């Protein structure tokens, strides 16, 4: 029996991803659709097709193509996606000291890097191109 496209795992995964309202997709959102290897192959194919962007181990973000270059970009921005990923993983965090000082009006320097202060343990790394989520004082747990 030949598998039609509507019955393929790739179609089912894309359908599930489109149904999700969040920008950040975790592997556990789609792990019930197939085996670990099957899901890995489909996710790799979606990254190759520039429909998803890999942010970390088991963490992906929905992508759209840039008008000006042939690069996929994270929907809503990488900094926002990093923070959404932390929330979805259940990691407690707060804004870094430079961002808090800027928001409180204590500093006029606009924070350039995405720095967060962790309140619970997180040993993961989040990257997208040259963007990287930095943990304040390089501490991965409190």
Image (cartoon, rainbow, N blue to C red):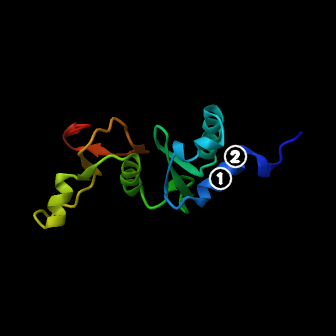
Quadrant of the rendering where the C terminus is positioned: top left
Identify which residue is drawn at 75% across, 45% down. Answer: 8
Dots 1 and 2: beta carbons under 8 Å?
A: yes
- For the residue pair 25 and 105, the one nearer the viewer reads as 25
Q: Residues within 10 Å of mark 1 (few under 14, many from 20)?
A: some
Q: Which residue shows up at 32% across the image and 39% down it?
A: 122
- Which quarter of the rendered picture does the N terminus lie within? top right
Q: Residue 7: x percent and y percent?
A: 78, 48
Q: Quadrant of residue 141?
A: top left
The vertical placement of 45 against 11, above or below, is: above
Q: Nearer the viewer, residue 118 or 129?
A: 118
Question: What residue does disc 1 label?
Answer: 14
* Disc 2: CA contacts within 10 A as few (<14), some (14-19) or many (>=20): some
User: Is disc 1 placed on a helix, strand or loop?
Assistant: helix
Q: Is residue 45 left or right of residue 92?
A: right
- The residue that label 2 is drawn on is 10
- State the SS at label 2: helix
Residue in the foreground of this view, choosing between 21 and 73: 21
Residue 40 at x, y = what percent? 60, 36
What is the distance, in whole Å, between disc 1 and disc 2 at their CAs?
6 Å
Residue closest to the far top: 37
The circle drawn on residue 34 is none
Residue 3 image point, x, y percent: 83, 43
């Amino acid at each position: 029996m030949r598998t039609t496209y509507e019955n393929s795992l790739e179609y089912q995964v894309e359908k599930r991803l489109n149904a999700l309202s969040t920008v950040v997709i975790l592997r556990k959102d789609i792990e019930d659709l197939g085996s670990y290897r099957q899901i890995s192959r489909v996710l790799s194919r979606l990254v190759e097709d520039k429909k998803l962007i890999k942010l970390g181990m088991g963490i992906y973000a929905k992508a759209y193509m840039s008008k000006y270059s042939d690069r996929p970009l994270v929907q809503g921005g990488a900094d926002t996606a990093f923070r959404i990923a932390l929330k979805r993983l259940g990691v407690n965090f707060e804004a870094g000291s430079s961002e808090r000082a800027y928001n409180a009006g204590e500093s006029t320097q606009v924070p350039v890097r995405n720095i967060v202060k962790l309140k619970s343990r997180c040993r993961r790394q989040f990257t997208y191109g040259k963007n990287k989520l930095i943990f304040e004082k390089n501490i991965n747990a409190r």
